[in-house]
């Protein structure tokens, strides 16, 4: 379990340790907005986040944003289903969009100001660039046409830079590189509507990773194999939809942010 023992709590000192501890406590209590605040404070204290701490940051913002993204999708569906209440639903959706905008802006500012510029670790650099692409993608989901194009452009630039770094710094079967390719391919399909590009990226990633799995330690092999299965599932959906000249069902590959 992530929650620290009493002995570890007694040994802790300093504001950074307190914030990491409180973030873990907030996670246990499923208070993800609080968790975001504690991890943001820890990230701004000048010491690079280690792998577990980066995952805490990712879990915090993903869960904080996730419930609002789901609520927004419900309002979009209900506006079409309940035309007699469309104005009330639009007003409520506008509140959700303001909240989504605030949360996306918050994490993107932390990434641009503190996390990406101050990172020296190769894997962490790719991790944060991937997050930047993800949160610009989430930002694009609820924007109007002009705002959507701007956010999508920023997402694509971040994903492209992250992939270029991953291909230089990380092996083809590294789970971080695979998770990035998964989310970038989902972006191509869901946001840009470029299914062929999504298929090409997913297929190329799988082909490159297949022969490199044996070089990983057992834990990373399992992690990479799980992401490769998601890539394979997406690839099957997208190629089937293309063959039928239809649109694949939404498959949000961002579950790999938990890894």
Image: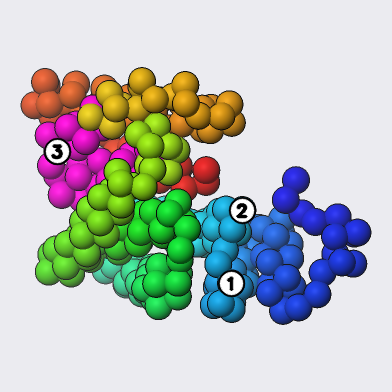
Q: CA distance from mark 3 to mark 2?
A: 32 Å
Task: State whether residue 55 appears in this view.
Answer: yes
Q: Secondary structure at mark 1?
A: loop
Please indicate whether residue 12 sits to the left or right of residue 256 in the image. right
Mark 3 lies on residue:
197
Mark positioned earlier in the residue sequence (1 or 3): 1
Between circles 3 and 2, the one closer to the viewer is: 2
Where residue 239 appears, x then y in whole percent? 18, 24
Q: Does residue 50 lie above or below 215 as drawn?
A: below
Q: Quadrant of the N terminus?
A: top right
Please provide percent x and percent y for residue 10: 90, 67
> Between tags 1 and 3, which lies in front?
1
According to the image, label 1 marks what residue? Answer: 47
Spatial CA distance of label 1 from label 3 is 38 Å
* Numbered range of the magenta stretch: 178-203
Image side of residue 150 versus residue 106, left or right? left
Q: Secondary structure at mark 2?
A: helix
């Amino acid at each position: 379990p992530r929650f620290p023992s009493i002995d570890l709590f007694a040994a802790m000192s300093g504001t950074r340790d307190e914030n990491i501890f409180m973030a873990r406590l907030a996670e246990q209590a499923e208070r993800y907005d609080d968790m975001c605040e504690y991890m943001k404070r820890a990230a701004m204290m000048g010491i690079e986040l280690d792998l577990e701490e980066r995952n805490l940051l990712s879990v915090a913002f993903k869960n904080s944003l996730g419930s609002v993204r789901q609520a927004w999708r419900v309002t979009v569906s209900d506006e079409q289903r309940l035309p007699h209440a469309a104005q009330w639903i639009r007003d409520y959706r506008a509140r959700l969009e303001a909240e989504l905008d605030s949360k996306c802006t918050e994490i993107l500012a932390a990434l641009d100001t503190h996390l990406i510029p101050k990172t020296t670790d190769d894997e962490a650099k790719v991790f944060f660039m991937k997050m930047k692409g993800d949160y610009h993608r989430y930002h694009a989901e609820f924007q109007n046409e002009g705002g959507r194009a701007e956010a999508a452009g920023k997402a694509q630039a971040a994903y492209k830079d992250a992939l270029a770094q991953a291909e230089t710094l990380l092996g083809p079967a590294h789970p971080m590189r695979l998770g990035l390719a998964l989310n970038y391919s989902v972006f191509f399909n869901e946001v840009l509507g470029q299914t062929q590009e999504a298929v090409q990226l997913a297929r190329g990633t799988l082909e490159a990773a297949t022969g490199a799995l044996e070089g990983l330690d057992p834990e990373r092999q399992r992690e990479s194999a799980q992401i490769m299965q998601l890539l394979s599932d997406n690839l099957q959906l997208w190629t089937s939809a293309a063959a039928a000249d239809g649109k694949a069902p939404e498959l949000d590959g961002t579950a790999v942010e938990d890894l």
